[in-house]
Image (cartoon, rainbow, N blue to C red):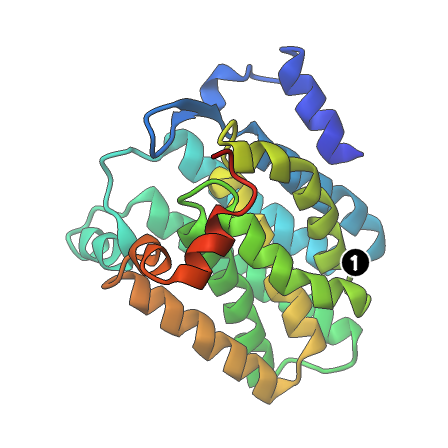
Amino acid sequence: MTTAAVRGLHRTGRLPGGSARWERTNHTGATVTLTDGVALAAGATVPLVLVDPPAALATAGAALAGAVDDLTGSATAAKGLRGHLRALAAGEPTTGVLKVAALAGSGLLACAWSDHRDGRGMTSSTLAGAALVAGAANLANLFDLRPGRALKVFLALGAPLAVEGRPAAGAVLGGGLVVLRDDLRGASMLGDTGANPLGAAVGLAAAQALGGRGRATALAAVVALTLASERVSFTRVIESTPVLRELDRWGRPT
């Protein structure tokens, strides 16, 4: 309901601050809105405040970090992990570096809170879980380069966790399905504001479901994909692999 309400505010021109500030140019050169990302973030966070407060912290922190990058980041700023680290080494921290720090901080607080609530205590497993939350949030953003791609990947990953009863996965699944149609049509984009909480929610749900070894394994996979993205284009790999190409194009207008 919250996701739909935010989308309604955008469509009627009543979104606080105006909708124009959330408009961007997509990969085809068309003007699209990032307000569906705002709607997804709000729709996932609000119910989690009641049913899973640590998850609400993770999604809200990721959304705020993403919004700062969406609204203040420069289109010509450093790209990729290496680019941001080079800028930092040169004494020019980017909004991307600040976003990663915010993701790490909110991920740590959320995972530590969740582990304490579940009687796990603060261990190295908590740190792995926190890194998984932050890494998944960043990875979702790396997939948000074509209509519907990030949603397809993370809703597929989150669906089994939602069935298992993990509120974070269920909340983002519900919000994601509401915005999926417009994302597939290329009428909207998640942006960092939507992609980051999408990944953070699935990352925390996975951390809650996994033990220490499972968290380490999942984190290794996220790190491997993130490092691979520095050298290999996900889009190029997808387009050159028939099965992945068909899945990626599914649901988009022909």
> In terms of depth relative to the viewer, which is nearer, 71 or 10?
10
Query: Which residue, given by chain and number where applicable, does mark 1 sit on?
Result: 52
The residue lying furthest to the right in this view is 50
> In terms of depth relative to the viewer, which is nearer, 51 or 235?
235
x and y percent of residue 53 in the render? 76, 56
From the viewer's perspective, is residue 208 above or below residue 71?
A: below
Question: Horizontally, is 185 left or right of 81 in the view?
Answer: right
Residue displayed at 19% across by 50% down: 91
Circle 1: residue type: Asp
Residue displayed at 52% across by 47% down: 195
Quarter containing the N terminus? top right
Secondary element type, mark 1: loop
Residue displayed at 55% across by 84% down: 124
From the viewer's perspective, is residue 206 above or below residue 23?
A: below
Determine the image quadrant of residue 31. Answer: top left
The residue lying furthest to the bottom in this view is 213
The answer to whether residue 101 shows anywhere in this view is: no
The answer to whether residue 90 shows anywhere in this view is: yes
x and y percent of residue 232 in the render? 26, 62
Question: Horizontally, is 223 left or right of 60 in the view?
Answer: left
Residue displayed at 76% across by 56% down: 170
Determine the image quadrant of residue 63. Answer: top right
